[in-house]
Amino acid sequence: MPTGKVKFFDADRGFGFIDGDDGESVFLHASALPEGARAPKGGTRVEYSVVDGRKGPQAMFVEIIPESPSIRRLNRRNPQQMVGLVEDLIKLLDASSNSLRRGKYPNNSEKIAQLLRAVADDFDA
């Protein structure tokens, strides 16, 4: 069975399109979705069979592929650990603002960049 991602789905009108992994765009009607399934959002991975419809390829027997958990999300720090990092970052940024006002980058700019990346990765997960 081919797989792809939902390009868009209009729940009010009951249809959308799938961009197949093979590059083919396939019509998706609400009747092809599993019974009781919510309307899929754009980017949802699906597996489906294809039939020739009146206006081209049409998806039938669509199954929504569950998302696998993100490794980054599984390894992110818990919020209590983030408190200390964020507080340290605030202190570093506040102290570095004086150097920047004088037209110089702070001596510890590498440390600041490292901490910013660590915090950003955990917030973004």
Image: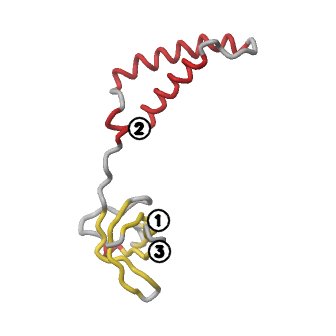
Q: Residues within 10 Å of mark 1 (few under 14, many from 20)?
A: many
Which label number is shown at residue 7? 1
Q: Residue furthest left?
A: 35
Residue 79 at what x, y percent from top left?
35, 25
Q: Residue, x 29% and y 67% (percent of image)? A: 63
Q: Residues within 10 Å of mark 2 (few under 14, many from 20)?
A: few
Q: Residue, x 48% and y 31% (percent of image)? A: 120
Give amino acid for label 1: Lys
Secondary structure beneath disc 1? strand
Secondary structure beneath disc 3? loop
Give amino acid for label 2: Ala
In this picture, residue 65 sits left or right of residue 105? left
Residue 97 at what x, y percent from top left?
65, 14
Q: What residue did someone put label 2 on?
A: 125
Q: Residue, x 24% and y 65% (percent of image)? A: 36
Q: Looking at the image, is mark 3 or mark 1 nearer the viewer?
A: 3
Give amino acid for label 3: Glu
Q: Earlier in the sequence, mark 3 or mark 1?
A: 1
Residue 59 at what x, y percent from top left?
36, 76
Which label number is shown at residue 77? none
> Disc count in the image?
3
When the figure is inspected, residue 98 is found, relative to residue 65, above or below; the finding is above
Q: How is colour applied across the structure in the image?
A: secondary structure
Q: Residue, x 28% and y 63% (percent of image)? A: 37
Q: Earlier in the sequence, mark 1 or mark 2?
A: 1
Residue 65 at what x, y percent from top left?
30, 60
Which label number is shown at residue 24? 3
Out of 9 and 104, give the one closest to the viewer: 104
Where is the C terminus found, in terms of image quarters?
A: top left
Q: Earlier in the sequence, mark 3 or mark 2?
A: 3
In this picture, residue 36 sits left or right of residue 11? left
Q: Residue furthest right?
A: 103
